[in-house]
Image (cartoon, rainbow, N blue to C red):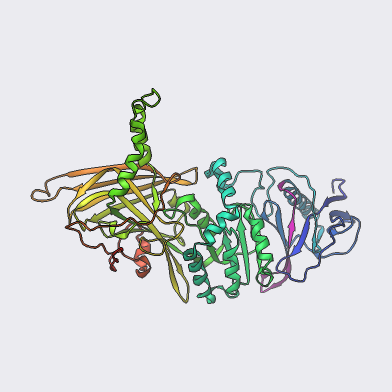
Amino acid sequence: MEQKHKQEFALASATELSSSSASALTQSSPVFARFSARNGLVELRFSEQSEAIGGYNVDPCTAQLLKLGPVQSVCISKDSDTNEEKSYSRGITIQFRDEEESRAFHCAFEQWKTEVKDQDAVVRFAVYLFSNPLLLVCFPGTHLPNGDVSGSLKSKFDDKVEPSSAKMYFHYYGQLLHQQNMLQDYVRTGTYYAAVIENRADFIGRVVVDVGAGSGILSLFAAQAGAKHVYAVEASEMAEYARKLIAGNPSLGERITVIKGKVEEVELPEKADILISEPMGTLLVNERMLETYVIARDRFLVPMGKMFPSVGRIHMAPFSDEYLFVEIANKALFWQQQNYYGVDLTPLYGSAFHGYFSQPVVDAFDPRLLVAPAVSHVIDFKKTKEENLYEIDIPLKFISSVGTRVHGLACWFDVLFDGSTVQRWLTTAPGAPTTHWYQLRCVLSQPLYVMAGQEITGQLRMIAHSAQSYTIYLTLSVKMWGPGADQGGILQTSSCKLDLKEPYYRMSQPQPYVLTQDQQPHQLMHSQDIPIQADDLEEPELIQLQSQCSGAQLQ
């Protein structure tokens, strides 16, 4: 074999997948993995001492060595062939110290396996169940057994996202205080818990993948509901905290494997029956994790598998809020000073004014500020393509319920957990219990004047950018009203450009609201009361919400 008779590596750890009785070596004993060739027989042996014999043997020619993450792999050994179908009896997870060492092991495995095939020899692969650190060397760009290229090359995620944005993103979600903020959103967490537990029939005995697992809370919910096994995929340092939390709940944790790595890069030993995730950002699409959710669907989900959630809707309606408009406009007054320590600041007033109006406002507002019934844009997570989320165009058409000034467009979202037993909505609507997402408003620097019954048209366009967010382009127009309107054109148009990445976190309580003389109490449409129809998912561009329920007066 090209004069190569053995190759030895120091090991980190090896643990039997889903095993609660796996034995482990002492931390003081070194663990070695050794490839060797004797009389045409190639074997790989794992043991505490480099020359030790014995161990657990598998045949690499019929086994699979898969990459779970940058520093973790799994070997699935074949048990038998039944009706020409492969049956895999055991999986061994192997932990490495760094990515280079992981690539080295895969590289060595492939090289020895290839040489065996070329010489019609038999390869023996032995894995014992241990726990200790490993040291390896290999070559970048090597093709792995699963057909992917090793981690030295850029992934799809890296191609789409600025390195600085990704670093900040994973740093943010790697901190417990931010996870606590989400866990303490009891509307969010409670709805997920109810959606999973009320639909136990979907989880019992099923394989689940938790996409962007964070603290691992959703993985634990899935295990509580009876999942056969849960793969919790998390790219940030939160994966280590998730391991701790799951280990502290051993009755559930024995059925959960935490995999540190990006969904776009990791490999799993089996397909998932269910995907569960919390991929929603502000306005549903911020942070662009919906794309990762869709990629996970294409990579890991079995045909006709379930997704929790399965559908998302962005709801939009024009609003009138004089308090908010004046608050934003007044921020720029600082730049109208003509003698600021002897300096005239007015040349920058216009830029500052437009800058403040380029920030979407994130807060909770009174639903009676809406001046027309909302419309919705549906995204079916089960069917949409990743590319469809790069650019989202939503036509807008409203009929004003009141005569007032329109200051912009209010937006919120909801998602559907389409369980076999119970359908449950998680909503961020104004007037509903507040979530950490709040609502979002795009404020026009030039308000529009409308009369009751007047039509408001426009477009909301969102274009994804490499900072894991979207640039928003909003245009609203009001048609001419009265005699001759059919021959008239657009009377007023107002537009704005906003960066969803840089919102104004106002997050104040709803302002006291007083009805104008010609205004009737606006009726908020609670999205969770609106059933999804099959036609809605086939034509996702625009839905006019019909059902309404009365809003209550503020005290």
Question: Outermost residue, top direction?
Answer: 342
Q: In this rendering, would 546 be left or right of 434?
A: left
Q: Residue at x 34, y 60 (%)?
A: 539
User: Where are the magenta residues, as a range?
Assistant: 77-99
Q: Position of residue 362 (x, y in %)?
A: 40, 51
Q: Residue at x 61, y 58 (%)?
A: 233
Q: Residue 535 falls in which quadrant of the image? A: bottom left
Q: Is residue 261 magenta?
A: no
Does residue 64 appear in this view? Answer: no
Q: What secondary structure is the stretch in magenta mostly built from?
A: strand
Q: Nearer the viewer, residue 64 or 91?
A: 91
Q: Is residue 93 magenta?
A: yes
Does residue 54 appear in this view? Answer: yes
Q: Is residue 229 above or below residue 284?
A: below
Q: Nearer the viewer, residue 516 or 68?
A: 516
Q: Position of residue 345 (x, y in %)?
A: 37, 27
Q: Is residue 70 above or below residue 529?
A: above
Q: Nearer the viewer, residue 149 or 261?
A: 261
Q: Position of residue 159 (x, y in %)?
A: 55, 43
Q: Residue at x 64, y 51 (%)?
A: 148
Q: Residue at x 48, y 68 (%)?
A: 191
